[in-house]
Image (cartoon, rainbow, N blue to C red):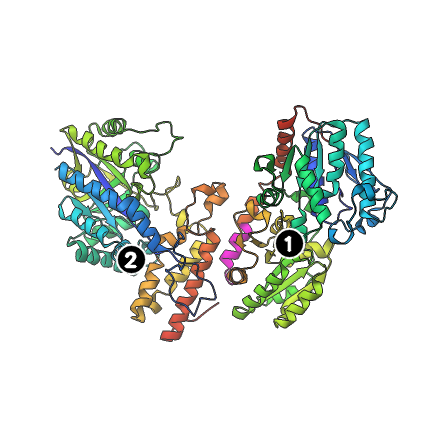
């Protein structure tokens, strides 16, 4: 399996998904060699062999900006300097070389590569071993850029990877549609396998501390409803629309506060927008949150909004549901495909979002029903089912699969 | 001795569906039922005209033909007040064809609440007003008196039977549900416990649902069902008994079961085959009660309906949203009626139609059987949201136009 990160050295959902998927696959009998581009300890991962492609520390790897492809990626791999580990392309070249050596020693039955970051390595491994290549798409460059103008080289890598792949796994119907529409890949080559949530990972002794967001708790006790979103502040996340909807909602019902947890390049713009709309005192910007502050942001919330313009899946929605939030999910977010007990809206439709927020805030029955009903749903979504689907796809190409 | 017979009873109803009514409409726009988008399942005119073409027109033509051809063919219809209002607006010819059926003297109209509401369970006074309103609408449109009562969704309990008995109805309809019947057959007239003069007719749900639910289901082992087989089943069921009560939604014909399933030909052929046997006939609901004395007494202390495997009201009142919506609605009764504001009262009553809370049902989500849920809304939560925004607007109109009531939230 070719990945870019695993917990605890992850910056986002990709590492979490890879971790749970691999664990469930291993439980179902797969032998996995998992390649990451850095060197570090991964406590608790004993169900597969982790290979480090470079001597970089996870922190140095963060600095490469894997998720901000517009700034650094401009070279064909052949022109990249394999010794320049400050350059994303240099690291990727080193990663490919490592995978080339690895597959010559241990020939895989299946190559499972995650996102554009590892697609080149996946294609090389397929060339060398002739083993089937599964490309797993957690996000495309169209999602990351929030537009049609992503990084052209990344687009090219994604296109080649998708073309070369024997089968493609998309994390949602939305992502599958992008792969078909933007890359002209035939629909029957793509399987949708939605991500899951492992709620046992939340059983770590954490207890919600009411003091973490003391001011918000005080407002709640006065009858306020806390609307929360936890995300990166990038254009892809649709937060400007979210803030406009907040202002619209406050016109009709003002016992609302909005908690925006996270950080990103849009932050200043969003703060400015809130002040222009005259609702600065309704919005709480936390900055980047981890650990207790992160968990508590879910806990203090009554309503969780995922306002994304383009969200392949959106695991945070399931996490928010687990922490007792009513969910409002944009129609452009894949996680909405697996849940029914939620409100949905088009990311640009601020009146609908405002109406839904007020509706929940002003009706206990609606709020309680949404919270309770969604729990019944996400509890049924498991990583074991994801692993079963993956095995099924492996077997559909070749019998007796072991996975690299 | 009377012939054995089928009691065919069809329920005709369309609700005034609530449009996408947002909090920004509240206190501003008071038209709750006219969705501006014509092509949605919430646009009542569009839905009514579509079903008129698929079901009401072809089925009424078929029924007229059967009545002309077979002197023994009879049936009963319950037609809600909100259906008649919509027919008057958008399909007067459909209403005229119902009148022709009734004019044959062999089609009986069954009494119910004008608004197809659950008022019986919330307000006895409002319930009686709606039964009265329906009686007078039927008198006005069809020139007939109703004699037999059915409540919304065939909901029934002993208290309701006593009420109908005291009111003067000669009969009442209910589900023939096995846990109540136990060893007894639904194919007789019964007497409800604690009543003196009223007859109880119980739906034979197996034979009814073979047509209403299963007819077009290709996964059903008996598919495709033909008239000969069905005629045998009905004959086997009735043998030495009095009646077989076939109760179903009228829209079974052409809407729930589409034309291309062969439902119309099937039914026409079945009626002919049934009447080919000289010992067989058809009864209207009051005809059956006149022809047969009750064979025994039946008690249903708890409410039974014709819905779902549970045969209860959980599809309408099972979750907190549904309970909250109706609690708010009925708590306004006194204030609303005192206003004498006809349009406000009419809007309030149209909101009592049981379909509105049905659209808020979540039990199929919990069962994981989402496809069992039919609704013009994206989710039960959306249905609730629009409804509650309308409730707020009713409060606003009370407050603003009539200086009574509070706004509360």
x, y percent for residue B289: 17, 42
**Left or right of residue B140: residue B90:** right
Chain designation of label 1: A
Q: Nearer the viewer, residue B63 or A159?
A: A159
Q: Position of residue B301 (x, y in %)?
A: 33, 45
> Magenta segment, which residues?
A362-372
Q: Is residue A86 left or right of residue B158?
A: right
Give SS at disc 2: helix
- Chief secondary structure of the magenta span? helix
Residue with the most extreme top position: A399
| Disc number placed over residue B127 in the picture, else none | 2
- The picture places residue A31, in percent across and down from the top left corner, at 73, 29
**Residue at the spot 38% in from the left edge and 47% down from the top edge:** B313
User: Which quadrant of the view contains residue B139?
Assistant: bottom left
Check the image and name the residue furthest to the right: A83
In the image, which disc is placed on residue A147?
Answer: 1
Q: Secondary structure at mark 1?
A: loop
- For the C terminus of chain A, the quadrant is top right
Residue drawn at 44 percent across, 67 percent down:
B26
């Amino acid at each position: 399996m070719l990945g870019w990160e695993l917990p605890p050295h992850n910056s986002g959902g990709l590492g979490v998904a890879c971790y749970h998927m691999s664990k469930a696959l291993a439980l179902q009998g797969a032998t996995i060699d998992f390649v990451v581009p850095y060197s570090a300890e991964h406590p608790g991962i004993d169900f597969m062999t982790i290979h480090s492609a470079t001597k970089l520390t996870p922190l140095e790897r963060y600095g490469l900006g894997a998720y901000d492809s517009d700034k650094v990626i401009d070279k064909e791999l052949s022109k990249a300097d394999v010794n320049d580990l400050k350059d994303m392309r240099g690291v990727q070249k080193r990663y490919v070389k490592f995978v080339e050596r690895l597959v010559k020693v241990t020939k895989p039955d299946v190559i499972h590569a995650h996102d554009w970051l590892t697609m080149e390595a996946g294609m090389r491994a397929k060339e060398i071993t002739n083993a089937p290549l599964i490309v797993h798409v957690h996000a495309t460059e169209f999602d990351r850029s929030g537009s049609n103008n992503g990084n052209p080289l990344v687009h090219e890598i994604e296109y080649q990877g998708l073309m070369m792949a024997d089968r493609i796994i998309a994390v949602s119907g939305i992502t599958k549609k992008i792969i078909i529409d933007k890359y002209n890949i035939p629909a029957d080559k793509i399987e949708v396998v939605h991500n899951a949530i492992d709620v046992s990972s939340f059983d770590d002794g954490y207890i919600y501390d009411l003091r973490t967001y003391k001011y918000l708790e005080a407002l709640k006790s006065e009858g306020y409803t806390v609307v929360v979103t936890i995300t990166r502040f990038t254009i892809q996340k649709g937060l400007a629309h979210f803030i406009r909807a907040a202002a619209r909602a406050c016109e009709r019902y003002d016992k609302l506060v909005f908690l925006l947890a996270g950080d990103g390049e849009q932050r200043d713009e969003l703060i400015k927008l809130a002040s222009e709309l005259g609702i600065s005192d309704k919005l709480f910007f936390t900055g980047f949150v981890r650990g207790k502050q992160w968990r508590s942001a879910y806990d203090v919330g009554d309503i969780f909004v995922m306002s994304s313009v383009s969200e392949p899946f959106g695991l945070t929605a399931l996490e928010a549901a687990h922490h007792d939030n009513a969910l409002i999910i944009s129609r452009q977010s894949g996680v909405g495909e697996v849940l029914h007990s939620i409100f949905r809206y088009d990311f640009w439709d601020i009146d609908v979002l405002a109406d839904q927020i007020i509706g929940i805030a002003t009706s206990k029955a609606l709020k309680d029903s949404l919270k309770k009903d969604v729990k019944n749903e996400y509890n049924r979504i498991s990583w074991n089912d994801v692993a079963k689907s993956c095995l099924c796809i492996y077997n559909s190409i070749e019998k007796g699969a072991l996975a690299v | 001795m009377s012939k054995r017979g089928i009691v065919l009873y069809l329920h005709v109803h369309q609700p005034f569906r609530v449009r996408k009514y947002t909090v920004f409409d509240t206190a501003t726009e008071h038209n709750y039922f006219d969705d501006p988008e014509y092509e949605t399942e919430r646009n009542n005119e569009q839905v009514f005209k579509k079903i008129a073409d698929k079901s009401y027109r072809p089925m009424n033509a078929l029924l007229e033909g059967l009545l002309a051809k077979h002197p023994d063919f009879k049936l009963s219809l319950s037609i809600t007040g909100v259906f008649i209002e919509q027919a008057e607006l958008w399909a007067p010819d459909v209403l005229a064809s119902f009148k022709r059926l009734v004019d044959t003297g062999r089609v009986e109209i069954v009494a119910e609440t004008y608004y197809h509401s659950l008022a019986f369970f919330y307000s006895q006074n409002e319930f009686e007003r709606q039964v009265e309103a329906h009686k007078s609408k039927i008198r006005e449109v069809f020139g007939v008196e109703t004699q037999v009562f059915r409540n919304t969704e065939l909901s029934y309990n002993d208290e309701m039977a006593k009420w109908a008995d005291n009111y003067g109805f000669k009969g009442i309809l209910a589900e023939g549900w096995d846990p109540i019947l136990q060893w007894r057959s639904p194919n007789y007239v019964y007497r409800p416990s604690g009543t003196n003069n009223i007859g109880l007719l119980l739906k034979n749900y197996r034979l009814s649902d073979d047509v209403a639910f299963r007819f077009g289901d290709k996964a059903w082992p008996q598919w495709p069902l033909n008239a000969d087989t069905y005629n045998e089943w009905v004959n086997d069921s009735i043998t030495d008994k009095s009646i077989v009560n076939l109760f179903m939604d009228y829209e079974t014909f052409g809407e729930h079961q589409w034309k291309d399933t062969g439902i119309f030909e099937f039914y026409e052929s079945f009626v002919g085959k049934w009447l080919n046997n000289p010992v067989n006939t058809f009864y209207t609901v009051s005809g059956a009660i006149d022809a047969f004395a009750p064979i025994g007494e039946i008690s249903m202390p708890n409410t039974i309906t014709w819905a779902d495997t549970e045969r209860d009201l959980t599809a309408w009142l099972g979750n907190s949203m549904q309970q909250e919506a109706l609690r708010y609605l009925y708590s306004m009764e006194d204030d609303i009626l005192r206003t004498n504001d006809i349009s406000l009262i009419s809007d309030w009553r149209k909101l009592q139609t049981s379909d509105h809370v049905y659209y808020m049902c979540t039990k199929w989500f919990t069962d994981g059987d989402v496809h069992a849920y039919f609704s013009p809304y994206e989710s039960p939560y959306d249905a609730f949201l629009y409804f509650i925004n309308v409730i707020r607007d009713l409060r606003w109109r009370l407050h603003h136009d009539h200086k009574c009531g509070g706004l509360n939230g």
